[in-house]
Structures are given as structure tokens and as C-alpha cells.
Image (cartoon, rainbow, N blue to C red):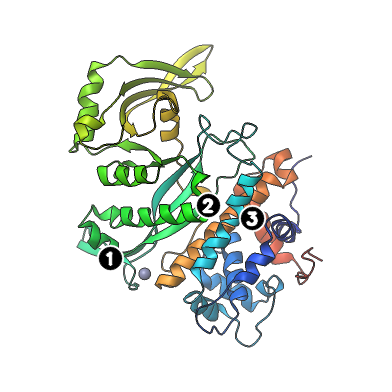
Amino acid sequence: MSYKLTLKRLPNFLRYVNKVYRFSQTINSMQSKGDPETSSQTIFMSVFLCMLLRLGSLRQLAADSKAGRIRKFVPRIDKETYCANTVANGLENIDTDILQQELAVVPKKLRRNKAYGSAEHPGTIGGLRIVAIDGTEHFRSECVHCPECMAVHVTTKEGVKVHYVHRMVIMYVVGRLHSSAVQVILGGEPALPKDALEEGGESPEHEGESTAAKRLIVKMITLYGNRFFDILTTDAYYSNKPFVLFLDSLGKYLVSRVKREDTTLYQEIDVLSQMVEPIHIDDREERVESWVYEIPELQASLDWDVPTRGFRILEKTYKIASGEKVYIKEETFLCMTTVPVELADANTVRQIVHAKWGVENKDNWYMEHNFHHHPNATYALLLILFMAHNLFYAYVFRHMKSYRLYHPTMKRIAEDFLASFLHWKWRMSWLHFDGT
Ligand SMILES: [Zn+2]
């Protein structure tokens, strides 16, 4: 037996997410701030399918809606006005607060079901609840832009050019994962041009990011509750005093890389780590040997009041060939944490640093770069993308029997979704949501 394509894939998916994650309620909750030509439910569902099926662009959505395929899956048909343009325009007014609330349905339910962060699903490291934040970039364009675009200066052969992008800080759950644990995206917050001004000219790739990150963290705690995470892990950009103090005021800890050589933090770790003896760890499961130089109580020399530890870590990745260890890669990096040693020893910190994942390249959640530029539309589109992402993996990891049996690739499953969409002949019965 091997993995077989089923044309019922998409209806099956919709039935499952409706039953377990009350998806029809999500659809029904959609609202528009204006008076859209097409209903908010139809706008949402069209874009959701576009994301889930990785159609890649609204042009493709237009073609599919013309062919009548999308209509089979939208709850009601706005006959006169339904087309890709009215969907794109509708996104300009769709209520993003509702989208963010509905995005929280999957993470909350998984947490209630202890689908991560528990002993049987060790999605946490050292029993700690960990989330990551990351700045991501979307819809890069040289000509199309809108009031909330960030201007990025790019050096090319023809001189310096301005590119327009949307930057978004997103938060997601990380950990050492059980195969049935879903790495959900918790939420996102756009970084705005005015954030960059407030920060006073940070490095271009991070314009306004930490202001947006702070807004996001506060929003996420309000939405998910204060106990939803203990530790935040980030890239090196956030290992600075204002951010550490901000997290500390919320009772949260930071684990972060340290990269900027011109900072006291970097220099202190660099110098002091040469005076301590490393601890040696052989992680046989991951096949990584490491030497960790730990510096306690860094805060005194940093002039910040939050207890901070610094680390220099040397890691050697190896393989086993004829019973012998053969080193294949070597890396040294610095990192820091405000987590007390009683909660996380050096090895736990080392694992947390590795826990981040690259969101943008994961399983081809591709999007056309010059999609309809509009502040509300781009934000709405990304929130809907995150919903599709969460529900897709929840379905694959927690429901799809043929995945557990045959482990097809995510690409293969995504192709099945599309085939099912293209060939499904009937209109989904929205009343029973059972695909008949
Ligand atoms: Zn824009």
C-alpha cells in the first residue's frame, strides 16, 4: 500500500476544520467596515481558498472564480458582483480585529487539547512555553506602493533603487516537536513607516520592527492570556536594553542571539568567555557536540537591572561512519538570556536558540510580490494566510490518517488539495458541511 490521491481531500479538510475548529463560525463572523459589493464571508472564503491551495495570485483566483470552481466552496453566492476585483476591494475594508481573533482559534484549541507543551507531546524545551517572533517581508515591489509601505534602499548595478515592501512581525510557537504537534502562527502586526521614525533610524532591514514587536506582544498576551508563553526567542536585533526591560516588565524572559560586535553585550561575552571553562554536551539524538562557555550575572557590566547570562557556544555537527564520529560542520555563536539558571540550564538555552524556524520558505506558502497594495488589504491577506497555514497543518498532523501511515511530502498533499479543488463536481453543502 502507498499513499493515494483522493478527490475528496478538500471537502474532507473543510468538514474536519468545521467540526474541530468550528470553521463555519469563523466564516460567518467576518465583517466589513464599509459596504462591500461582495459579502465579507465570500471575500474571506475566496482568499482563504486562494491561500490554502497556493494559487499564488489573485489573477489565478479570478480565473478559477470565472470557471465557477471557487463558487462550489463559498457559503453563499453573490451572483452579480462576485469577481476577483470585488474580492480585492473587499479586503480593503474587512475587519482585521476579527481576523486576528479567529486566527487564535487553532492555537487555543491545540493548547486546550495539550497538543503541544505537555509531557506526551514535548513541544516545549525543558518544560518551558516558548514562542518566537520574526520580522518578515512581503509584497516587495519597485513601482507599486501604498501609504504603509516601507521604503528600502537597494544598491544595484544601476545605482541605489527604492523598493517598497510590507514588513510584518509575526509570533509563532516553537519547541522540540512531537510529530503530531502543530507549529502554529499566533499572530502578526504590521511594522509601519511611523514606527521607523519613532525608533530613529534603525538598520534598514529592521525599520520600525521593535515598535511593532512590542505592540504584537501586548496584543498576543491579551488575546491568549498571560500564561501562554514564558520565553520569547528572537534574532540578534532584539538583544538590547530597551527590549529586555520591556519583556521583564511583562514578566517574560528573552533568549536571543548576540551578533553586533559594537555592543557592550557582545564584547563582554566575547572577553569573559575566554576566562571560563566550557561545559561539554554530546546531543546524540541531534548528532551535535557542543562546548558552552557560560557567563553569569552579565547585567552589572551592562547597566541593565535584569539578571542576564551570556554564552559562547561552539557546536560541531557529526555523522557516524563505520562506528566512528566524523565531524561535518562547525559553528561558533554568541547568545544571551534573562531566564534564571534554575529554569533553564546552558544546554536548554542552546536548544531554545535553535528552535526558531524560517517562516517564509516553509512548504511554499508562496505569494505574488506585487499583490494589491493597500494597508488593510495586505494585513488581512496575511492573517488569512496564517489561518490557512494553521488549519492545513492541524489537519495533516492531527487528522490525516494517510499522512501517519505513508508520510507523503507537504508538497504532495498540497497538490492533492488542488486536484481535489479542480475536480470536485458538486457544490459543498454548507448546511451539513459534509462534502455531499
Ligand atoms: Zn504597500
> Which residue is the extreme one toward the right?
436
Cβ of mark 1 under 8 Å from ligand 1: the answer is no
In x, y percent, where is residue 97? 50, 66
**Type of the residue with mark 1:** Lys
* On-image quarter of the C terminus: bottom right
**On screen, residue 120 above or below 6:** above
* On-image quarter of the N terminus: top right
Relative placement, left or right, of 344 versus 74 is: left
Comparing marks 3 and 1, which lies closer to the viewer? Answer: 1
User: Of residues 375 and 205, which is closer to you in this image?
Assistant: 375
Which residue does the numbered mark 1 point to in the structure image? Answer: 194
Q: Is tag 2's residue or tag 3's residue first in the polypeptide sequence? A: 2
The CA span between labels 2 and 3 is: 33 Å
**Type of the residue with mark 2:** Tyr
**On screen, residue 110 above or below 23:** above
In x, y percent, where is residue 429? 78, 70
- Quadrant of residue 122 within the rendered picture: top right
Residue pictured at 53% horizontal, 31% vertical: 127
Relative placement, left or right, of 77 versus 377 is: right
**Type of the residue with mark 3:** Glu
Q: Is tag 2's residue or tag 1's residue first in the polypeptide sequence? A: 1
Residue pictured at 52% horizontal, 71% vertical: 58
Which residue does the numbered mark 3 point to in the structure image? Answer: 415
Which residue does the numbered mark 2 point to in the structure image? Answer: 224
Which corner quadrant of the figure contains ligand 1?
A: bottom left
User: Is residue 412 visible to us here?
Assistant: no
Count neighbours of disc 2 (C-alpha within 10 A) and say few if under 14, some if 14 to 19, many if 20 or more.
some
